[in-house]
Amino acid sequence: MLMEPAYLLANASVVPDPHSVTFSKHIRPLFEVHCNDCHSGWFPDGGLRLSSVDEILEGGKSGPAVVPGQPRKGWLTYTITLKDDSRLKMPPGDASLSASELDLIFEWIRQGAR
């Protein structure tokens, strides 16, 4: 079972209206900075493309990247919250998403990942 980090939504000021997190305005820009170098194009890592909602919902080799309305399920939330140096941690290496970036992603999924 995937665990939701305790600090999620700790920085509520990130999203002026918590019911308005959208892929195009909030999530796509995060993925463009942190994810799309590896998860786009003809041969994305793990077969997972993160360029559109449809691609995210389709998932990759490991299954669906997100489960709309259920942020504790799906590979995306699992891999972005790993703290160890496992090969599954995303972004890989020393890079990681900030607490406010994680909050946005989890809230977007909670709202239905649209």
Image (cartoon, rainbow, N blue to C red):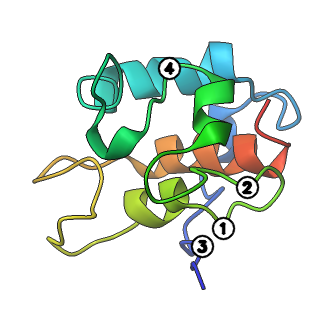
> In the figure, 96 relative to 8: above or below?
above
Quarter of the view holding residue 111: top right
Residue hosting label 1: 73
Of callouts 4 and 1, which one flags the residue occurring earlier in the amino acid sequence?
4
Q: Residue at x 53, y 72 (%)?
A: 5
Q: Nearer the viewer, residue 24 or 5?
A: 24
Secondary structure under tag 4 reads loop
Relative side of 1 to 94, left or right: right
Of callouts 3 and 4, which one flags the residue occurring earlier in the amino acid sequence?
3
Secondary structure under tag 2 reads loop
Of callouts 1 and 2, which one flags the residue occurring earlier in the amino acid sequence?
2
Instruction: Estimate the spatial distance between the alpha carbons at disc 3 and disc 4, rounded to whole Å.
Output: 24 Å
Q: Are marks 1 and 2 in contact (CB under 8 Å)?
A: yes
Going by the picture, which residue comes out furthest to the bottom? 1
Secondary structure under tag 3 reads loop
> In the figure, 31 relative to 6: above or below?
above
Q: Residue at x 80, y 52 (%)?
A: 110
The 10 Å Cα crowd at callout 1, few under 14, some 14 to 19, many 20 or more, is: some
Residue hosting label 4: 51
Instruction: Estimate the spatial distance between the alpha carbons at disc 4 and disc 2, rounded to whole Å.
Output: 17 Å
Amino acid at the residue labelled 3: Glu
Relative side of 10 to 47, left or right: right
Q: Nearer the viewer, residue 80 or 41?
A: 41
Residue hosting label 3: 4
Closer mark to the observer between disc 3 and disc 4? 4
Q: Position of residue 113 (x, y in %)?
A: 76, 38
Residue hosting label 2: 67
Secondary structure under tag 1 reads loop
> In the figure, 107 relative to 21: above or below?
below
Q: Are marks 4 and 2 in contact (CB under 8 Å)?
A: no
Q: Position of residue 15 (x, y in %)?
A: 71, 32
Q: Position of residue 90 (x, y in %)?
A: 30, 52
